[in-house]
Amino acid sequence: MKPTIALVGRPNVGKSTLFNRLTKTRDALVADQPGLTRDRHYGHGRVGEKPYFVVDTGGFEPVVDEGIMFEMARQTLQAVDEADAIVFIVDGRVGITPQDKIIAQRLRQTDRPVWVAVNKVEGMQRAVVTADFFELGLGDPVAISGSHGEGVRDLINEVLERFEVPADEGEADHPKFAVVGRPNVGKSTLVNAVLGEERVIAFDEPGTTRDSVYIDFEHGSKPYTIIDTAGVRKRGKVTEMIEKFSVIKTMQAIEDANVAVLVLDATQEVSDQDARVASFVLETGRALVVAVNKWDAADEEQRDRIKREINRKLGFLEFAKFHYISALRGAGVGDLFKSIDQAYAAAMIKIQTPRLTSALQLAVERQQPPLVGKVRPKMRYAHQGGTNPPVVIVHGNALEKVPASYWRYLEHTFMKIFKLQGTPLRVQYKLSG
Ligand code: GDP
Ligand code: GDP
């Protein structure tokens, strides 16, 4: 499991600057997708071989409350409890402020490991600046400069050393799908409907409340793993408890799955939270099946509305299959498996270089990349650089000049030629020497 690092600190200490640096490389992988909701608070990063999630607690609305927590927004506190590690950022040029002390007091109560990062120290004497911050009582402060990148890599390496990062534990050889969505859309009802009739083989009790539950089962004598983000705590109970939506739990489940099943509520509008979960799926590159639930309860008007809103707000999910289901009545639930299988197969496809290269040539014959001045970028061959999502690497010259729209055209063409349904596909390039 990828560790999640939460960046905490008062305004203006440099959280978002550091966040941008920590997520830069991964961000660049996702070409601009029209309609994609960019969430500036959650991102993926990687140091060497080690992947991690970062949460910037910065832009959240402060919640005014009593006691020492009034300084820290509710979401910040939730992130502190759910993250695996906390990086507490302070400003080395300003020194300790009363706000820093309040935050430190709260952080001393968490059982998560905390690092104090003294920021903005470029050109300063590190030992002198950091000495001030011992007083926070959170261990040895580390000196960094987020904007210049100094000390950042060392800090993250130190944080990640704490966590066992599995060295590519071998891909699952069967569909492993996460049921995700905002609270109350019907995730647990769907999980129950799916499992109700199947043979459950194994079942992991969640370690902590933030963990999802993993259940192995068979359907049509084929193995599957379902990742239940709603938690089996609710199974069998009639109580309707609306859970706090955990972004971190959702992100980790999506990351850990090979297929995401995004559940929407047909009786409600498509909300920002829905779009945000959908964006995570796309950024992570996971295969996707969308289940528009509560179809039984939606009247004609609501059905029209949700279809319109899906087109307008979730247009970037055009690669996915949509199902209109009723988890409560078990209607349409069996059909989901066909799409899960299809999405899984598409995500894991392996295409040989000659086949990819002829597909590339066909695409270029139909539509050439545009001229750049007098130069026509030349695409020579293509090979596959990964699965889940499939990555196609195009080799050639002057490819850095090819516009994003043309890369999207290639993506669509490959998806059509290889009949990939349910997975995004990424096209990257490599310049021939
Ligand atoms: P946030 O409110 O904590 O997210 O802080 P920002 O990332 O928006 O940064 C606040 C200000 O500090 C901006 O003007 C940044 O350019 C500046 N800043 C951030 N990191 C550094 C740094 O490492 N050195 C210096 N000198 N300034 C920085
Ligand atoms: P979760 O928070 O996403 O896990 O949602 P739940 O599975 O707890 O469902 C929330 C509420 O929606 C409960 O009252 C369910 O009975 C109801 N619900 C779930 N699926 C359906 C459905 O297909 N049709 C209708 N009418 N209600 C449903």
Image (cartoon, grey):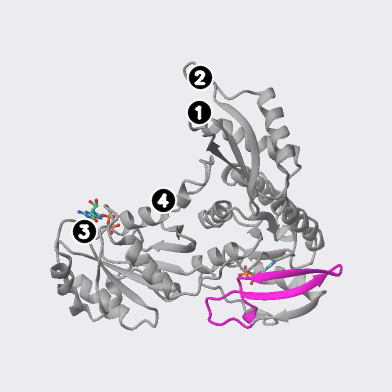
Q: Residues within 10 Å of mark 1 (few under 14, many from 20)?
A: some
How far is disc 3 from disc 1 in space, using C-alphas? 39 Å
Which secondary structure lies at badge 2? loop
Amino acid type assigned to the residue bearing label 1 in the image:
Ala
CB under 8 Å between callouts 4 and 3?
Answer: no
Whole-percent x and y of residue 198? 81, 74
Q: Quadrant of residue 405?
A: top right
Q: Is residue 265 left or right of residue 246?
A: right
Residue position marked by numbered label 4 in the rendering: 24
Q: Is residue 225 one of those drawn in magenta?
A: yes
Range covered by the magenta-colored residues:
205-233
**Disc 4 to disc 2, C-alpha distance:** 30 Å
Q: Earlier in the sequence, mark 4 or mark 1?
A: 4
Residue ID at (21%, 78%): 136
> Quadrant location of ligand 2?
bottom right
Q: Are marks 1 and 2 in contact (CB under 8 Å)?
A: yes
Name the front one of labels 4 and 2.
Answer: 2
Amino acid type of the residue that numbered disc 2 sits on in the rendered structure: Val
Name the residue that disc number 1 marks.
Answer: 398
Residue denoted by label 2 = 375
Residue behind label 3 places its C-beta within 8 angstroms of ligand 1: yes
